[in-house]
Amino acid sequence: MNLFDFQLLPHSEKVDILYDHGVYIGKRKEKNQTVILYQLEGFYVEVFYKKYRCFVTRMHCFSSTILLEVYLEQINVEHLIYTQ
C-alpha cells in the first residue's frame, strides 16, 4: 500500500491497518493531545489523540524524513554502537 492509497481509505480502516500492520516509532505531546507516530511500508502516519488511544482527532501522513526530527530524541541507538 502506498501513501496515496492509504489516504483514500475510510478513517476506521486506516486505524485498523495502523494497529495491525504499522510499526510504532514514538510518541510526543502537542498541546492537549498525544501524537503517536507509525511507519507503514514507505511512509509515516502521525495519529493525534484527544484522549490517549481513545479518540483520534486527525491523522497526518507523510513520507519526508525531515518531519521525524521531533521523534529522534526518543530513539535509543545505544545498542547499535559497537565498542571494544
Image (tube, rainbow, N blue to C red):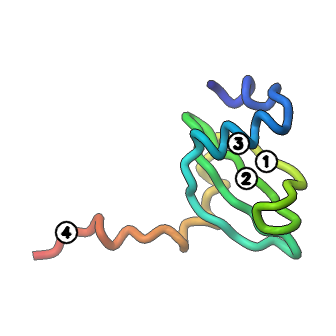
Q: Earlier in the sequence, mark 2 or mark 4?
A: 2
Residue 69, how many percent across, how many down? Answer: 61, 63
Whole-Å distance between the Cαs marked 2 and 4?
Answer: 32 Å
Residue 45: x, y in percent? Answer: 70, 46
Determine whether label 3 and label 4 are within 8 Å by CB: no
Q: In the image, what residue type sits under mark 4?
A: Tyr
* Element under disc 3: strand
Quadrant of res 62: top right
C-alpha separation, residue under disc 1 versus residue under disc 2: 5 Å
Cβ atoms under marks 3 and 1 closer than 8 Å: yes
Secondary element at tag 4: loop
Q: Nearer the viewer, mark 2 or mark 4?
A: 2
Find disc 1 in the rendering and name its residue: 60
Judging by the rendered image, the residue that carries numbered circle 3 is 62
Residue at horizontal 33%, vertical 73%?
Answer: 78
What's the CA distance linking mark 3 and mark 4?
A: 32 Å
- Residue at image x 76%, y 53%? 47
Q: Which residue is mark 4?
A: 82
Q: Position of residue 38 (x, y in %)?
A: 62, 50
Q: Amino acid at mark 2?
A: Glu
Circle 2 SS class:
strand
For the residues labelled 4 and 1, the Cα–Cα distance comes to 36 Å
What label does residue 46 carry, if any? 2
Q: Earlier in the sequence, mark 3 or mark 4?
A: 3
- Which quarter shows the N terminus? top right
Quarter of the image that includes the C terminus: bottom left
Q: Earlier in the sequence, mark 2 or mark 3?
A: 2
In-image side of 3 versus 11 (left or right): left
Q: Earlier in the sequence, mark 1 or mark 2?
A: 2
